[in-house]
Image (cartoon, helix red, strand yellow):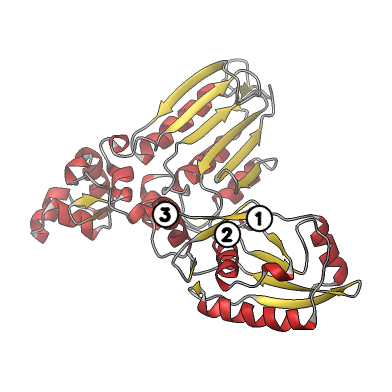
Amino acid sequence: MMEAKELVALIARGENSRTQFKRSQDVTNARSLAGEMAALANSKGGKILVGVDDTGSINGLSREDVRRINQLISSTATDCVRPSINPETENIIVDDRLVIVITVPEGISKPYADNEGVFWVKSGADKRRVTSREEIQRMFQSSNLVHADEVPVKGTSPDDIDLDRFRAFFKKHYGEPLEDALDQAEIPFGQLLNNLGLARGEELNLAGLMLFGRNPQRHRPAFVVKGVSFLGNDPAGDRYRDSQDLDGCLSCMYRATISFLTRNLKHVQGDKGFNTEGDLEVPLAALEELVVNMLLHRDYFVSAPWRVFIFDDRIELISPGSLPNNLTIENIRSGVSTIRNPRIASFATRELPYRGIGTGILRALAAVPELELESDLERNLFIARIPRRIC
């Protein structure tokens, strides 16, 4: 139950992506209210304060307003939002003025649309229509209705598989040569890929392409790691020590990214002898965990590269896609995890130093306690930031 002083403090902070002000005369149309509710449910949830104007002044509501608006809320949530939602309402009195607080939780069955089939999301304090297929797919992904790594990649075929890599993988993990298994099962190679969840029909899915593709960037050119070692601490600077686009399959990009980091970081002599190389300034175990996390848990519906930036005072590993579902930085610091790309993750336990039990970030934090994690909702990015111990 919200107290009056909490409501006053909430109003004082103004409108934002999770708080919306409405006068009584603004809440008369079910379609408009449905759009506001759908936008909150498709985003991170939030509150609509009815009886407060855009300036934050509390106008209040009459008893007649309260009856009418509560009926409208109920009918809108049930009949005008698809799928229907269950908002909560509270009537709170501040200085003899009554305000209805409508709380819309983040939806678990995204995407939500109004009764005309329009999808809405929050954009700052306002809402906007969702028109791009990729953004709608991401909302389906958040409800576990579709995963980017299982979507077929148009124009691919089993011929795009790196056969040498796949043969080695198959022999190691299934205990027999690939050709012998195909002969024994009497199935073509493409059918085996379908059986393993690496293809759909005649096309590879994204997992098959990124895990075992001969040249994944031919079909998904944005999926590269852009590594830059800057001079100074400004990401807008044009002076750098080293710059490289790292491509190939996921295991290739993992090895190349670790190599890029280790050759651009310093070694600390410490108590080591004069002729020894010394220890890397950032523990290698932390870098390995963070690079794996970056490659596996990105949002593959976003057509954008990974970025690894080395500055004089910090390292940044940047993945497309903020934290999914209800995950927060506090959650993942406590060991809570969600697998965004389950097909890729299931093979990564055999292709990368990945355990798949949600403890990678915990191990990185144990090795580098000063590690900073940021989920940037506005730019749709996840950033792992490591302060450098030496400059």
Query: Regarding mark 1 in the picture, which secondary structure is present there?
Result: loop
Q: Which of the 4 image quadrants contains residue 90?
A: bottom right
**Circle 1 is placed at which residue position?**
17
Q: Are marks 3 and 2 in contact (CB under 8 Å)?
A: no
**Circle 2 is placed at which residue position?**
43
Left or right: 353, with 204 as reference point:
right
Dot 1, how many residues are within 10 Å of its Cα: few (below 14), some (14-19), or many (20+)? some
Q: How far apart are marks 3 and 1 (CA)?
A: 27 Å
Question: At 62% from the left edge and 15% from the top edge, which residue is drawn?
Answer: 274
Name the one closer to the observer, 31 or 83.
31
Amino acid type, callout 3:
Asn
Q: In which quarter of the image is the C terminus?
A: top right
Q: Where is residue 141 in the image (x, y as percent from the top left)?
A: 44, 59
Dot 3, how many residues are within 10 Å of its Cα: few (below 14), some (14-19), or many (20+)? many
Q: Where is residue 347 in the image (x, y as percent from the top left)?
A: 35, 52
Quick one: label 3 or label 1, which is nearer the N terminus? 1
Left or right: 387, with 220 as reference point:
right
Q: Are marks 2 and 1 in contact (CB under 8 Å)?
A: yes
Q: Where is residue 287 in the image (x, y as percent from the top left)?
A: 55, 37
**Circle 3 is placed at which residue position?**
341
Name the one closer to the observer, 191 or 40.
40
Question: At 91% from the left edge and 71% from the top edge, which residue is drawn?
Answer: 95
Question: At 50% from the left edge and 58% from the top edge, which residue is drawn?
Answer: 357
Q: Position of residue 250 (x, y in %)?
A: 37, 40
Quick one: label 3 or label 2, which is nearer the N terminus? 2
Q: Which of the 4 image quadrants contains residue 37?
A: bottom right
Quick one: label 2 or label 1, which is nearer the N terminus? 1
